[in-house]
Image (cartoon, rainbow, N blue to C red):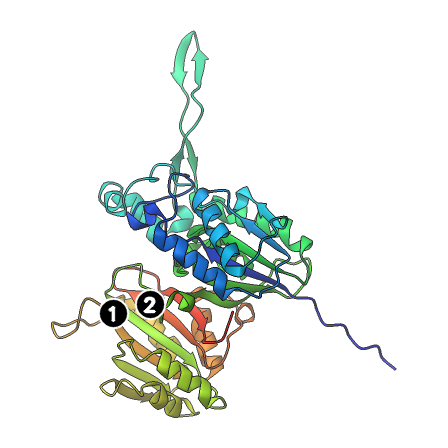
């Protein structure tokens, strides 16, 4: 008689970005400098994050050494009602990206005075370079002092190297357990990217909001190949969907993988979305998508509803958007918000859509039916942005 197979121990990793800092509020680049601390809003949001995670059994907590993360961790632990500190570890690998020339400068100043570098940072992050401060040295040549050349670093590439090193060191220690990581926007993007085989060229595709919660699962012990279960969830902060960070003009898609087998979840989503302006919907008529779309638009009677016969319509539409890089705007459209559309299709179609945005394999995404993901196409950006994935009213 064959032996029963033991279930594979899955390592679950919960990632949380720090709360709003003084530099966030002032719209300044922070990088790896340690000048910023949490605002009152940052402390309150971090505490609410702890409440959302209350009851989660943690094997360990890993944090960045920077103050804004340390303060966030304290508030999260209070919200979780955890007093024991022995399982908290600080890792230098979890520090934010190192951008020494920009740290402390406002976003606007950098855009105006480092225009070429800023464009590279946004469009070709894997090629982005920055002068690296070097210890003051001089080289003697023929009795004459010659200044040494300034070193160059590749901030995004270096950050991805740190992320890989972190996974190599940490994952073998917690096989089959749950760990919490409290870190920074850039660092969490690098951690997620390296776990699900996203290229560093896609660095700007993932949004990370203050105190946003993301979840990775690692099903194979000893391997760094993970699956993304949830990304940038902010519902515990009373946000229906995450706030936009890259301008407000463009196209925002609310994508729902509908099955037709859980009408109560669709009803909950409709209630959840009632305050979000929705201009139109796209659905397939080859499954229950049309019916689900009508239910989701319960509070949006003026939304234009369109049916599409082709099952590959999301991929074709995305391709056209990325090639033309334009969204039709007119004086009748409110430019204070993006044009927003609801896309309802089968889980397989939506999963392929998200896979296309992230440029990774379908095996790296754990798409949950009857949940909500948000994709934003900024008007002045070459990349779409995944704002959130698998938003649900269920607990984390």
Q: Which mark is residue 376?
A: 2
Q: Nearer the viewer, residue 245 or 240?
A: 240
Q: Which mark is residue 175?
A: none
Residue 264, relative to residue 51: is it above or below? below
Residue farthest to the top, as pictured: 143
- Which structural element holds mark 1? loop
Q: How many marks?
A: 2
N-term mark: 2 or 1:
1
Residue 282, relative to residue 96: is it above or below? below
Dot 2 crowding, Cα within 10 Å, few <14, some 14–19, many 20+: many
Could you tell me which residue is drawn at 32 percent across and 39 percent down?
104
Residue 240 located left or right of residue 390: left
Query: In the rendered image, which quarter is residue 114 located in?
Result: top left
Residue 340 percent across, percent down from the top left: 28, 75
Residue 166 located left or right of residue 16: right
Q: CA distance from mark 2 to mark 1?
A: 9 Å
Residue 311 visible to an observer of this rendering: no
Could you tell me which residue is drawn at 26 percent across and 76 percent down?
277
Q: Quadrant of the N terminus?
A: bottom right
Q: Which mark is residue 338?
A: 1
Dot 1 crowding, Cα within 10 Å, few <14, some 14–19, many 20+: many
Asked if the residue at tag 1 contacts the one at tag 2, i.e. Cβ–Cβ closer than 8 Å, the answer is: yes
Query: In the rendered image, which quarter is residue 252 located in?
Result: bottom left
């Amino acid at each position: 008689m064959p032996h029963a197979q033991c279930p594979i121990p899955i390592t679950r990793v919960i990632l949380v970005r720090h709360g709003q800092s003084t530099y966030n509020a002032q719209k300044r680049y922070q990088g790896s400098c340690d000048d910023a601390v949490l605002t009152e809003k940052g402390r309150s949001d971090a505490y609410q994050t702890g409440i959302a995670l209350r009851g989660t059994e943690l094997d360990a907590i890993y944090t960045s050494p920077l103050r804004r993360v340390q303060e966030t961790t304290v508030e999260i632990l209070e919200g979780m009602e955890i007093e024991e500190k022995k399982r908290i570890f600080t890792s230098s690998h979890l520090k934010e990206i190192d951008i020494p020339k920009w740290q402390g400068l406002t976003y606007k100043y950098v855009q105006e005075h480092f225009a070429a570098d800023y464009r590279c940072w946004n469009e070709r992050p894997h090629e982005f370079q920055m002068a690296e401060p070097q210890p003051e040295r001089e080289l003697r040549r023929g009795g004459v002092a010659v200044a040494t050349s300034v070193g160059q670093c590749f901030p995004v590439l270096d950050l991805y190297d740190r992320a890989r090193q972190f996974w190599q060191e940490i994952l073998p220690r917690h096989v089959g357990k749950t760990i919490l990581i409290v870190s920074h926007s850039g660092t969490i993007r690098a951690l997620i990217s390296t776990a699900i085989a996203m290229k560093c060229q896609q660095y700007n595709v993932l949004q990370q909001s203050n105190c946003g919660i993301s979840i990775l699962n690692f099903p194979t012990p000893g391997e760094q190949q993970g699956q993304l279960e949830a990304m940038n969830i902010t519902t515990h902060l009373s946000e229906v969907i995450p706030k936009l960070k890259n301008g407000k003009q463009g196209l925002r898609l609310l994508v729902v993988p509908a099955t037709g087998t859980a009408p109560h979840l669709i009803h909950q989503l409709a209630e959840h979305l009632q305050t979000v302006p929705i201009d139109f919907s796209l659905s397939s008529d080859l499954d229950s998508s049309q019916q689900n779309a009508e239910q989701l638009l319960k509070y949006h009677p003026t939304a234009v509803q369109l049916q599409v016969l082709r099952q590959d319509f999301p991929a074709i539409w995305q391709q056209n958007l990325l090639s033309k890089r334009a969204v039709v705007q007119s004086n009748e459209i409110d430019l204070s918000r993006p044009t927003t559309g609801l896309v309802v299709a089968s889980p397989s179609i939506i999963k392929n859509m998200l896979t296309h945005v992230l440029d990774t394999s379908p095996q790296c995404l754990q798409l949950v039916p009857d949940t909500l993901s948000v994709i934003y196409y900024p008007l002045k950006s070459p990349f779409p942005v995944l704002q959130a994935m698998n938003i649900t009213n269920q607990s984390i």
